[in-house]
Image: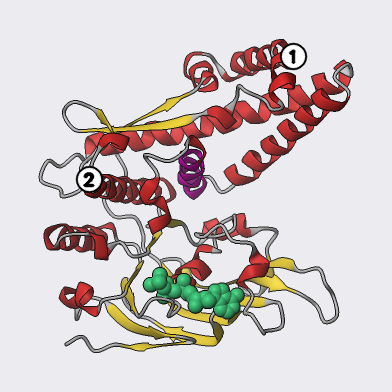
């Protein structure tokens, strides 16, 4: 069981320079709940996206960094946050640097003024969990969307996971190319498959560990009265069966043998058919363990929220730091009972929560409990809720 209250960190100051709709923004906040209110297109999600870049990857919209630089601006952007943590104050910075006259831009990461090797280094100070409307179709959508969701769950507890997934994709792409262009080059294929097998088992094992921990936590904290139903989680795929039943070395040998055997089949398919790239995350719910894909739209949303809240609890328990939670347009889709339940649960988790919504009334009951801010293009200021 995770400890009841992991340490909490707060973003107290956010600076954006030439990021999407913001030429320059200096924003002070002081509370653990922050609500951003504004019309469609005002720039609310842009703020959440900026914060999401303190995690490895391309942020909550999976956009190219170059597209985040403000149109009509210098082509570079900078984001920085001042953090108050139980271990002191820190300043984290990231962005895209494009020195004068250069066409190439590079990602920058700084911690307390010193360069950091990659965004994975931010994990020491800040962990992130998010939910966006893009995830609404998660249970009914293609398995690739669930794998990405799953990898983000893992990434929040293991900042190196993303690098391993990318390295595995590169190794498999190289294997597919060799199978297509020089299929008789056995030595080269052996070498690529050895590398792929090592990475594949590491990726599959990390996913399995996170899913098992999450499933156990969901079971342990299961509350029949919660407005967010609990889910059961399982991983499905040949490699997941290997990882579940064999020690890592044996699973790696077995997967390497599988790759060798399936060369002709993979060559014909133009891709590697077996491996972590074929895993699916199965989510079920209710007394009859119904697949989440069969639940109603509202039930799916509630299940997803329940999963994300449980994950936030897991991240807090494992890292000792309550994660920041970014909720884009989540409150708007809930009935008043679920919305009140959500706000209460968020407060109990202890991490800072950044939420968005177009209607100020959504956050009326948070007056005095949250920083409620009005967003208009390029600007954010306090909003007095009537
Ligand atoms: N690189 C960019 N430079 C300038 N403006 C941009 C850039 N990228 C996106 N925008 C603008 O940002 C706005 C969208 O901002 P955002 O997604 O944050 O809105 P929102 O307040 O979350 O809206 P909604 O309620 O509709 O979700 C759009 O008007 C879009 O044109």
Q: Which residue is mark 2?
A: 299
Cα distance, mark 2 to mark 1? 44 Å
Q: Is residue 362 above or below residue 139?
A: below
Q: Is residue 1 visible?
A: yes
Pick the quarter of the image with the N terminus.
top left
Toward which corner of the image does residue 267 lie, by quadrant? top right
Where in the figure is residue 303, as x and y percent of width and height?
27, 44
**Residue 65, percent from left and from top:** 65, 65
On the picture, is 191 further left or further right than 12?
A: right
Badge 1 element: helix
Ranked by sequence position, the earlier of labels 2 and 1 is 1
Which segment is the magenta one? 145-157
Q: Residues within 10 Å of mark 1 (few under 14, many from 20)?
A: some
Q: Position of residue 355 (x, y in %)?
A: 34, 68
Indicate whether residue 287 is drawn in magenta. Answer: no
Q: Dot 1 corresponds to which residue?
A: 264
Above or below: residue 161 compared with residue 66: above
Residue 190's mark? none
Q: Nearer the viewer, residue 330 or 294?
A: 294
């Amino acid at each position: 069981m995770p400890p009841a209250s992991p340490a909490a960190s707060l973003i107290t100051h956010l600076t954006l320079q030439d990021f999407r709709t913001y030429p320059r923004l200096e924003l002070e906040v002081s509370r653990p709940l922050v609500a951003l209110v504004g019309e469609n297109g005002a720039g609310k999600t842009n703020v959440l996206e900026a914060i999401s870049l303190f995690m490895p990857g391309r942020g909550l919209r999976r956009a190219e960094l170059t597209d985040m630089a403000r149109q009509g601006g210098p082509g570079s952007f900078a984001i920085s946050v001042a953090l108050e943590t139980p271990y002191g104050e820190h300043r984290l910075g990231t962005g895209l640097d494009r020195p004068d006259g250069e066409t190439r831009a590079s990602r920058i990461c700084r911690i307390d003024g010193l360069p950091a090797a990659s965004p994975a280094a931010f994990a020491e100070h800040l962990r992130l969990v998010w939910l966006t409307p893009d995830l609404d179709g998660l249970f009914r959508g293609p398995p690739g969307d669930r794998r990405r969701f799953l990898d983000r769950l893992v990434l929040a507890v293991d900042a190196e996971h993303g690098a391993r997934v990318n390295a595995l994709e590169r190794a498999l792409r190289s294997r597919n190319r060799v199978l297509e262009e020089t299929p008789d080059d056995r030595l080269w294929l052996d070498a690529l498959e050895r590398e792929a097998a090592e990475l594949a088992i590491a990726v599959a094992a990390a996913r399995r560990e996170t899913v098992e921990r999450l499933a156990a936590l969901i079971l342990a904290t299961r509350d029949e009265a919660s407005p967010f139903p609990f889910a059961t989680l399982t991983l499905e795929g040949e490699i997941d069966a290997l990882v579940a039943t064999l020690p890592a070395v044996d699973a790696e040998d077995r997967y390497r043998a599988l790759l060798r055997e399936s060369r002709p089949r993979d060559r014909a398919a133009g891709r590697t058919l077996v491996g972590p790239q074929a895993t699916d995350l199965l989510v079920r719910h209710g007394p009859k363990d119904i697949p989440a894909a069969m639940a109603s739209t509202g039930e799916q949303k509630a299940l997803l929220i329940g999963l994300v809240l449980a994950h936030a609890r897991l991240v807090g328990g494992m890292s000792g730091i309550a994660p920041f939670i970014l909720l884009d347009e989540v409150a708007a889709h809930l009935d008043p009972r679920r919305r009140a339940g959500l706000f209460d649960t968020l407060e109990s988790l202890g991490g800072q929560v950044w939420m968005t919504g177009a209607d100020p009334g959504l956050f009326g009951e948070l007056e005095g409990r949250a920083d409620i801010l009005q967003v208009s293009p390029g600007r954010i200021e306090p909003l007095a809720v009537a």
